[in-house]
Image (spheres, grey):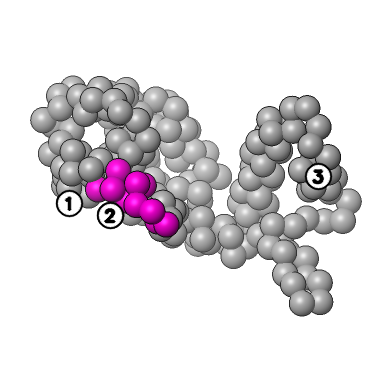
Amino acid sequence: MPFGVFDPRQEFSVVWRHLPHWEQPGATYFITWRTHDSLPRQVVAESRLGRVGADTMLTRMAELMFIEVVRRYLETMPPQQTGWLAGLRDEVVAPAIACIHARPSEDWTLATLAHEAGSSRTVMADRFSSIVGVPPMQYLTQWRIQLAANALTSSRAKVSAVAGQVGYASEAAFSRAFKRATGQSPAEFRSAGARVLGSPGSNPST
């Protein structure tokens, strides 16, 4: 599906290739850390000991480890790198991305995003497009469609409710935008997702 800059196979595969790694004879562990980092060792200990609250602890630790991985990647990212991750380190683009991600249902315009970032519309449009690879409003649409796709396959909410959650005033407008982006109507997309998730032996991640 043409989710563009949000396809994890594009963005997060790049992150994965840049993760710090530690090699031992016969094995390579890609999500590993400097020897003085204590968090990975604590994760291993929690998983082995099975103490009360271990599941919650492991979930939070995984979140912290992911944040640290992204931080390290951003610190070593080449200046010419594009994409939404690259946008997170730009003083104009980062606030706009944060607004879109935090409040996707808001009636964003180029002017309001520029205002949030303390820039002009021209600067916002130019910087966003050159760094992220798509204009701000296209990014907003793609983000909304991705959120909607996740909601359609992970919940039983009505299509009209999903449309409202991601910022569309009508189900018809949402359906047109969704089909334009994915090639399927919301109902067709949900049905296909349900079949995949319900197939014996299927892998939902593929």
Secondary structure found at label 2: loop
Q: Where is residue 83 in the image (x, y as percent from the top left)?
A: 44, 53
Examine the rendered structure and indicate whether residue 140 appears above or below residue 84. Answer: above
Residue of label 1: 183
Q: Distance between the residues labelled 2 and 1?
A: 9 Å
Front disc: 2 or 1: 1
The magenta segment: 192-202
Relative to the observer, which residue lies in front, 68 or 99?
68
Residue of label 2: 2
Residue 140 shown left or right of residue 75 in the figure: left
Residue 77 shown left or right of residue 102 in the figure: right
Tell me if residue 125 can be seen. Answer: no
Q: Callout 2: few (<14), some (14-19), or many (20+) C-alpha neighbours within 10 Å?
A: few
Residue type at the position of mark 3: Arg
Rendered-image quadrant of the C terminus: bottom left
Give whichever of discs 2 and 3 has the lower sequence position. 2
> In the figure, residue 53 lies in which quadrant?
top right
Q: Where is residue 80 in the image (x, y as percent from the top left)?
A: 50, 62
